[in-house]
Image: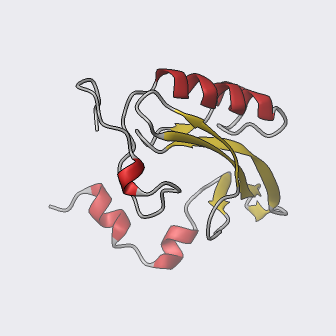
Amino acid sequence: MTSLLDRILRRPATDLENLMSTEIATVDEKPAPRILMQFLTQGGATVDLYEHAWTVHQYGGGEQREPLRRSGIQWVCQGCDQAGKDHSLGWGYVETEPHYSREAANAHAAECRPCRSPRSDSPFPPDSAPLCRKDCTS
């Protein structure tokens, strides 16, 4: 007996396109986000505040409407990989109030303790990472 998930995954592409949907969001492909500001966590990682753009595809009454281009400010912690999305301000993105993203990123940096993991995309060389304390979670 096949599961529902197996049946959905095995459907032809035409069936998947006909599934009911009111809105589909796609993130624009970019090589690297433009970092606006960085905050240092207690463990030595950074919380990066960056510009984010995406396209919202709307469907209503069986017809596709004009895609909407949106942009806003988001943050991501390089220590614990938590992304900043304030769901109380609409669809998880802060579009018109960038200072909320800045305050949330700063508050996260004040509380986050994971140490910076040596990554190839880090702006700091691996030997500049601080020594981890016992309460370091990564």
Front residue of this view, candidates 130 and 22: 130
Residue pictured at 41% horizontal, 49% vertical: 128
Residue pictured at 49% horizontal, 54% vertical: 124
Quarter location, residue 74: top right
How many numbered marks, from 0 up?
0
Front residue of this view, candidates 117 and 130: 130
> What is the quadrant of the C terminus in the image?
top left
**Position above or below: 101 against 65:** above
Among all residues in the image, which is located at the extreme left?
Answer: 1
Residue pictured at 53% horizontal, 77% vertical: 14
Residue pictured at 62% horizontal, 54% vertical: 21
> What is the quadrant of the N terminus in the image?
bottom left
Is 60 situated left or right of 11 in this image?
Answer: right
Among all residues in the image, which is located at the extreme front?
Answer: 128
Is 91 situated left or right of 115 in this image?
Answer: right
Please name the colour scheme applied to the rendered image. secondary structure
Is 68 situated left or right of 104 in this image?
Answer: right
Quarter location, residue 118: bottom left
Is 65 situated left or right of 22 in this image?
Answer: right
Residue 79 in the image, given as x and y percentages of width and height: 42, 40
Residue 94 in the image, given as x and y percentages of width and height: 74, 36
Front residue of this view, candidates 82 and 38: 38
Residue 129 in the image, given as x and y percentages of width and height: 39, 45
Residue 102 in the image, given as x and y percentages of width and height: 70, 31
Front residue of this view, candidates 104 and 87: 104
